[in-house]
Image (tube, rainbow, N blue to C red):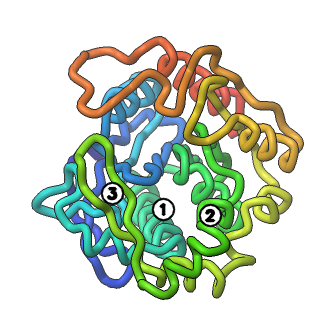
Amino acid sequence: MIDFRNKVYTGSQNRDSLFDCTIDDNAKGVVIFVHGYKGYKDWGAWNLVQKEFVKNNFGFVKFNMSHNGGTVDEPIDFPDLEAFGNNCYTFELQDLETIISETYRMVNSELKMDIPIFLLGHSRGGGIAILQGARDSRVKAVISLAGISDIGARFPTGEELENWKREGVRYVLNGRTHQEMPHYFSMHKDFKAHEKELDIHLACEQLEKPFLQIHGDMDQSVSISEGLNLAQWTNTRVKIIKGAEHTFGTKQPWERDELPHEMKEAVAAGIEFFNKLPF
């Protein structure tokens, strides 16, 4: 068995971050969780989600993106806004690939097991999971939880884009922490330089492995229309959670010892999906 929290890994741009891992000796597969925008591995109820998957005989790995604004010493919230501002989508892909490689090594070398690796991404992390899953043969299935369908649509256009280019930085208010969170224009430049690599529509068409989109019908952050797009592009169906918004009833901090019913339903759908795979 492997069981640890807050182990250091070196992500993109040689920046250190943290990851957690629990894999029992009887695990039927390992789920790697990918957090979303303004997220981190310990946000809200993700620890309870991990426990639920482990209880159902799946290993579970979750990690902080190297440029999510956390640090090794302070992984909660956003003490390093400079790192946050310098983040790029390609950095997140590199971080995920690093975590997949480390998970693959642990499973094969330390546990001497031959079990599949699955991806579970929330929000922006859902898009990252699709992009990586389409190009990585070690990934055997992907779940997108309220995942995005279009990275380009996240950027401003017109005068707002020109202002960003001219100023070099734009700020987004974090309503919970009250921080003015920067985004440097390098993120847009990086996207334009790797636009094909970051095309989620194209990745969906190349995703020749099982896929499930789970979406709340009350999601006001990522419209359910994006989930319907992902399902259409992968020739699958959306699992719709009635009454669920973007975080499926969870929030930060999460002080209860059980999941809200919306997240319970989403997790149950994910476990059922992985259990039915022919691995």
In which quarter of the view is residue 69 placed?
bottom left
Q: Quarter of the image containing the C terminus?
A: top right
Q: Badge 3: how crowded within 10 Å, few (<14), some, or many (20+)?
A: many
Q: Amino acid at mark 3?
A: Asn
Give me the C-alpha separation between circle 2 and circle 3.
16 Å
The furthest residue to the front: 159
Circle 2 residues within 10 Å: few <14, some 14–19, many ≥20: many
Q: Is residue 179 left or right of residue 27?
A: left
Q: Nearer the viewer, residue 234 or 183?
A: 183
For the residue carrying disc 1, how many other residues have a C-alpha within 10 Å: few (<14), some (14-19), or many (20+)? many
Q: Closer to the camera, 186 or 173?
A: 173
SS for callout 2: helix
On the question of residue 1 being in view, the answer is no
CA gap, disc 2 and disc 1: 10 Å
Splitting the image into 4 quarters, where does residue 227 fall? Answer: top right
Expressed as whole percent of the image width and height from the top left, the position of residue 216 reads 62, 26
Q: Residue at x 32, y 43 (%)?
A: 175
Reading the image, the residue beneath label 2 is: 132
- Indicate which disc residue 64 carries: 3
Question: Is 262 drawn above or below residue 53 in the view shown?
Answer: above
Q: Residue at x 48, y 22 (%)?
A: 263
Where's residue 51, x and y in %?
A: 35, 28
Q: Which residue corresponds to mark 1?
A: 100
Mark 2 or 1, nearer chain start: 1
Q: Quadrant of residue 112?
A: bottom left
Label whose residue precedes the other's in the sequence (2 or 3) = 3
Which numbered disc covers residue 48? none
Q: Is residue 53 above or below residue 125?
A: above
